[in-house]
Amino acid sequence: MGVPWRRRRSLQICLLALAWLTLAGGCPGPPFNLPLVGVIQWDGGANSFQERLAGLLEGLREEGYQDGLNFKLEVVDAQRDRSRVAAAARRWEEQGARLIITLGVVSTLVTLEITRQGAVPIVYSMMGAPASLGLALPAEKTDLRFTGTSDAVPPAEQLRFLVKAKPSLRHLGVLYCSVTPEGEAAAAAVDHAARAMGLAVIRRFVPDERESGLLEILDDLFHQQIDALFIPADPVLSSPRILRCICDRALKAGVPVMTAFQEGVRAGALMAYHGDNEETGRQTGRQAALLLAGFRVWTVAQETPRIKRLTLNLQVAQELRLPLSRALLSRAYHLYP
């Protein structure tokens, strides 16, 4: 029995289409002129930046955006070099990028400055206190060209875990770098929260990242007989090299260190209570997806971490002879080493 005419005709069309796809390379390629999205990492070699980038890309994928399919992604590692940030931001603006995503305080500030005369939207991440850096809502929201997800976690929540780790805590040292408004604002917030909890606060700052000056300030704090040291969100003191220097000195002095970021525990701090790196990256990715979908910047609200994690360093606790309670250990999401 022969094949009916209509079925035979449909089969011919399918075979012709298959032949065309084969000649074209097997499958149709992506459309031309995909919207460009640039991502600038301040320190791509750090685990925290790698995790944040992974979460960011996952957030975009969850919203249906895939590199090479419906947008073009370019990632630049600035390697803690402002000139690299400036060059990337300038190039992307000239290329008509749909948006730029900045990971880190310096990446964000430099990009905003370079593109100040333009209209390219900025989505920031890995910032502790955006408002202290001028990233607050303007009087006219339609003038807004940035949004993002900060790393801000209420200091009172962080300090409650520190008190659980060391119930005898009475005198708290707070160390920050005065070169950035973010460090000062974060330190002031910790100071206020600690005093509200009845703690005595001894606050010190370093003017830069030189190790000699840092060690002098640390020794002065330890001489004040502080019971613990808190390092708030600070773009200078969050450097792995600086963190290791601080934590090594504190361990020798028998003083536990708490930081506002997980990287600090990797460097030798006792603990950190912080936003989940990848999950906060997902939040940033979803915000970027809204802008790619055509939403105006001022309609995409700025956010703080929705998921927070407690990270503990068991080896440091053992060396400091701090018997961490079972209740505290059960709250930990990450345990080092």
Image: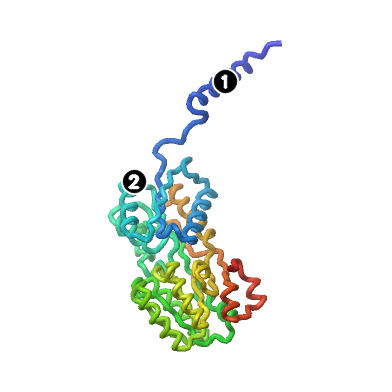
- Mark 2 and mark 1: span between their CA atoms? 41 Å
Between 221 and 192, the one lying in front of the other is 221
Quadrant, the C terminus? bottom right
What residue sits 45% from the left and 57% below the top? 300
Q: Secondary structure at mark 1?
A: helix
In the image: residue 134, left or right of residue 202: left
Tell me if mark 1 has few (under 14), some (14-19) or many (20+) residues whose alpha carbon lies within 10 angstroms of its own: few
Q: Are marks 2 and 1 in contact (CB under 8 Å)?
A: no
Mark 2 or mark 1, which has the lower sequence index? 1
Q: Badge 1 is on which residue?
A: 15
Mark drawn on residue 96 = 2
Quadrant position of residue 202:
bottom left
Quadrant, the N terminus? top right
In the image: residue 136, left or right of residue 322: left
Where is residue 216 drawn, in percent x and y? Answer: 38, 82
Residue type at mark 2 is Gly
Quadrant position of residue 311:
bottom right
Where is residue 162 drawn, in percent x and y? Answer: 55, 78
Where is residue 134 drawn, in percent x and y? Answer: 35, 67
In the rendered image of this protein, does residue 19 appear above or below residue 102? above
Q: Secondary structure at mark 2?
A: loop
